[in-house]
Amino acid sequence: MLLKELPEERKQSVDKLLESDYGARYFNTPASSKADRHSCFEGGLFVHSITVTKLLLAQNKAMKAGISTDSCIIAGLFHDLGKCGNMAEPFYVVQQDNWRRNNLGEYYKYNEKLNDSLTVPQRSLRMLQNFDVKITDSEYIAILYHDGLYVPENNHNSLKNSKDKLARLLHFCDSWSCFIDNV
């Protein structure tokens, strides 16, 4: 459905990613580690990503922002791709400590073996690059800064003053999905 909207070259690269072992992880990874956060369940990342993409497409149309459909699809579907980890290690592993699971709602924890020093957005961009998914400058900026000013590494004037429509809209749709819809 959504992928049919992509130009053929981009679709082929995305298909290559999704049909890989790494792509299989995309469909099974949770979107967060704790029960009180969005989509903390197996497959939650995919559910969250689809939700963000649909919101992004709808808001782009409603606001007459003029962002291309394929940019909305790529940024929406893959803004959190880095939560799948890297080629060798997943980002999340199942929390084995029953006390933490039962009392803190920590169903997953960060994988200590994932030692690539990348943030989730940086890893997302790296993994897209690894599968030859070509992205525009605007898509790069949107994915890199989709967490907005919620994270300290994004607290700089170039982001605060950015007029990149896709970056602004992706951040809004991601935040809406997480905090309002809890997806």
Image: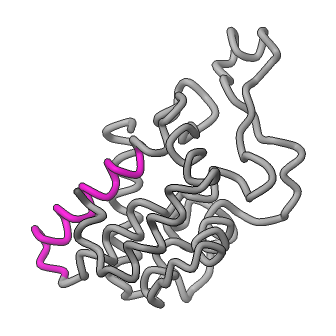
Q: Tell me: 10 left or right of 66.
A: right
Q: Identify the residue at image location x=69%, y=29%.
A: 108
Query: To which quarter of the image does residue 161 belong?
Result: bottom left
Secondary structure mostly seen in the magenta stretch? helix
- Image coordinates of residue 77 in percent, x first then y, are 41, 60
Q: Based on the picture, tell me whether residue 172 belongs to the magenta stretch.
A: no
Query: To which quarter of the image does residue 153 belong?
Result: bottom right
Q: Tell me: 58 left or right of 79.
A: left
Q: Identify the residue at image location x=38%, y=36%.
A: 182
116 and 183: which one is in front? Answer: 116
Q: Identify the residue at image location x=77%, y=10%.
A: 98
- Image coordinates of residue 123 in percent, x first then y, are 68, 66
- Image coordinates of residue 21 in percent, x first then y, are 63, 50
Q: Identify the residue at image location x=54%, y=63%.
A: 17
Q: Against 110, is 158 above or below?
A: below
Query: To which quarter of the image does residue 103 belong?
Result: top right
Q: Tell me: 5 left or right of 141.
A: left
Residues shaded magenta:
48-65
Q: Against 135, is 177 above or below?
A: above
Q: Tell me: 151 left or right of 58.
A: right
